[in-house]
Image (cartoon, rainbow, N blue to C red):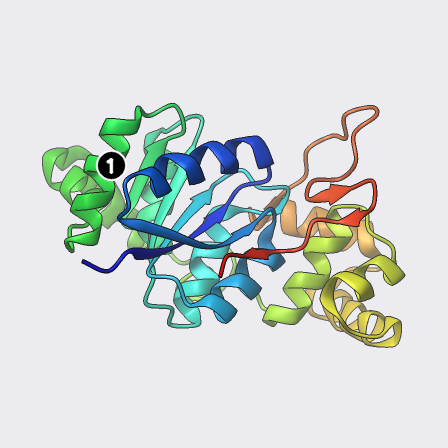
Amino acid sequence: MLARRVLLVDDHPVFRTGLRRVLEATGRYEIVAEAGNAHEAIRAAEETRPGLILLDVQLPGITGLRITRILRRKQTRARIVVLSVHVDDDRIIEAVRAGAVAFLQKDIGAEALMTALSRICAGENLLRAEMLARPELARRLRAELRLPSETGGADGLMPLSTRELAVLDCVAQGLSNKEIADELFVSEQTVKNHMTSVLRKLNATDRVGAILHAVRQGWMEVAPPVPGELPAGRTGSGHDKTQTVA
């Protein structure tokens, strides 16, 4: 049986390493790429076309659930599994609406994880199964789906293009124009052009205003910086590029 191609997305390298080892030890999964933030995840998904994506919901900047929506909009065939320290009804409903097939706690045991992934790879939708097992949750989801989206679109998509989203994601992580240009392999002028478009589309006067708007809409989360730490996904020698395994 061919190994399932997997993309791991989490801003903690230690967690990614542990997850990689658990998956690769089974011989059923091949880790084709890793990412530590939204724009790396989207780029890696486009470049490696994985069949399975394990995605942390609480990424710095653009959230994991927003990434799920974006990948679904780009018609990825990957089955997306959302991981979180805490799982509650609100986020389960968000995950269903975003298009994920499972929402698992990050402290799940290795055996339980392998069982869940086997079911997912066999075509099961664990979120749908949970809805069937909890009628009250299904009723709540149906009621919420009848409400107009807070962001104005039928599926709550933000008005930004994928590249504009990548720029905003980098801005939220505190990168300068030059660092963003290096990260996204574009010129500084292109970064400025994208940021101008972001401000116009979000009706914001500056970058802080754009980020606050995105946070209020639930598109991103901005955690307070920890003293002495570099921004997520960054290292002392530059930045942690998406890693592809041959």
Q: Quadrant of the N terminus?
A: bottom left
Q: Residue at x 32, y 42 (%)?
A: 93
Which sits in the foreground, 174 or 25?
25
Which sits in the foreground, 115 or 88?
115
Q: Quarter of the image holding residue 221?
A: top right
Left-right relation of 184 to 187: left
Q: Residue at x 72, y 62 (%)?
A: 167
Estimate the x, y position of residue 48 in percent, counting from the top left.
46, 67
Left-right relation of 9 to 147: right
Q: How many marks?
A: 1
Q: Residue at x 64, y 45 (%)?
A: 215
Counting other residues with Cα less than 10 Å from the Cα at mark 1, is it few (<14), some (14-19), or many (20 or more)? some
Which sits in the foreground, 21 or 175?
21
Estimate the x, y position of residue 32 in percent, counting from the top left.
45, 57
Estimate the x, y position of residue 177 in percent, counting from the top left.
87, 61
Q: Amino acid at mark 1?
A: Met
- Residue 178 in sight here: yes
- Residue 128 in sight here: no
Q: Is residue 10 depicted above or below 157 in this figure?
A: above
Q: Is residue 175 depicted above or below 189 in this figure?
A: above
Q: Residue at x 24, y 28 (%)?
A: 111
Q: Secondary structure at mark 1?
A: helix
Q: Quarter of the image holding residue 200?
A: bottom right
Left-right relation of 98 to 128: right
Which sits in the foreground, 120 or 243?
243
Q: Which residue is mark 1?
A: 114
Estimate the x, y position of residue 187 in percent, counting from the top left.
84, 75
